[in-house]
Image (cartoon, rainbow, N blue to C red):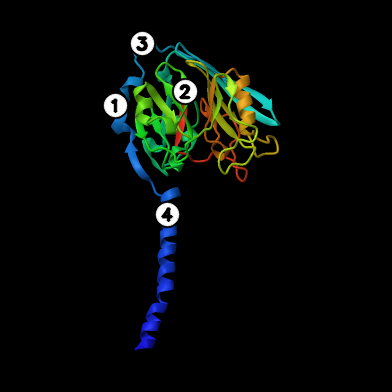
Amino acid sequence: MKNNVKKRRNYWPFIYGILLTAYTVFALLEAFVLPSDIVQVEDIKKQSSSVSNNEDDNIKSEPVITETSYKSNNISITITTLRRCETQVYVADIVLKDISYLQTAVANGTFGRNIKDTTSAMAKENDAILAINGDYYGFHDRGYVMRNGYLYRETKHRSRDYDDLAIYEDGHFEIFYESQYKAKEIADAGAVHIFSFGPGLVKNNKVIVGKNSEVTYALQSNPRTAIGEIEPLHYVMVVSDGRTEESEGLTLYELAQVMEELGCKTAYNLDGGGSSTMWFMGRVVNCPTDGKKSGERRISDIVYIGE
């Protein structure tokens, strides 16, 4: 009888191991593969009508388009390239008639974890003129997320020094700490977009990151994506190459210096590395890569300019 009891007890380590393995696999699938927290964008479009184009106020004209520019009554975009720190940097200078032309989109028109597509696919689906990758909100389950006037997520990051970017109806940018404000407070103050990646790069015309600042787990020199405000409705979107023989990549401090050089009074770092992509009029402008393979990474969202 004692021997039988002993044998039964010896099964528990195996059972525990199986359960632990199953839990680990599920946790990894939930974090990186399985869609969750889903909201269909079509279901909330009516609620965000305050930031949709007003056909009576915004008169469309036949745009003048070149390989590096787009000009209409409502939008002016000029793309130039810079060479900084052994790296190719692509700059889109943007002037808008109003904030409704600075828009965002999520993969497959669906907000949620692990729902992904390329910047190109999302840009085409939304008739974008210019697009860059966003903050890859879907990689995290925390951090404020507001898009086109709709507040999708109000859960704060655990870190007290996590800073977000708010873009307001009048076109101005503001960097703020999640620990100091509720998402609803920022929305009620007139925000139409909130991005949660960071860190902030420039504030009040001054670089606010140190020479050794870096995003968690990132390499020191990377492909980068940033958005900056020169003045309300005058913006720059910046994407750099990196991790190649032709382009080393930028540190956060070097990226901040570029944004300051371009005249930004406020600038914010978006998702970088393999995500960094700039798309203009049907083509990818930069050379996206994660260092191991070339081509666009599938991500959860974009920032774009559209009529």
The residue drawn where x is 36% and y is 26% is: 185
Q: Identify the secondary structure beneath mark 4.
A: helix
Label 4, on which residue? 27
In this rendering, the label closer to the viewer, 2 or 4 = 2
Q: Is residue 280 above or below residue 158?
A: above
Label 1 SS: helix
The CA distance from mark 4 to mark 3 is 49 Å
Which of the two labelled residues, at mark 1 and mark 4, occupies the earlier sequence position? 4
Question: Residue 10: which quarter of the image?
Answer: bottom left
User: Tag 3's secondary structure?
Assistant: loop
**Is residue 276 depicted above or below 57 in this figure?**
below
N-terminal of the pair, mark 3 or mark 2, is 3
Closer to the camera in the image, 297 or 69: 297
Residue type marked 2: Glu
The quarter of the picture where the N terminus appears is bottom left
Q: Which mark is residue 174?
A: 2
Q: Which residue is mark 1?
A: 47
Quote the CA–CA distance across marks 3 and 1: 20 Å
Q: Earlier in the sequence, mark 2 or mark 1?
A: 1
Residues tagged 4 and 3 counted as in contact (Cβ below 8 A)? no
Q: Which residue is mark 3?
A: 57
At label 4, which amino acid type do we have?
Answer: Ala
Which label's residue is closer to the chain start, 2 or 4?
4
Q: Nearer the viewer, mark 4 or mark 3?
A: 4
Q: Are marks 2 and 1 in contact (CB under 8 Å)?
A: no
Residue at mark 2 to residue at mark 4: CA–CA distance: 35 Å
* Residue 32 position within the rendered picture, expressed as x and y whole percent measured from the top left: 45, 48
Q: Position of residue 24 (x, y in %)?
A: 44, 58
Q: Select label 3 or label 2 by which is in front.
A: 2
Cβ–Cβ below 8 Å for labels 2 and 4? no
Can residue 101 be seen? yes
Name the residue at 59% across, 31% down: 286
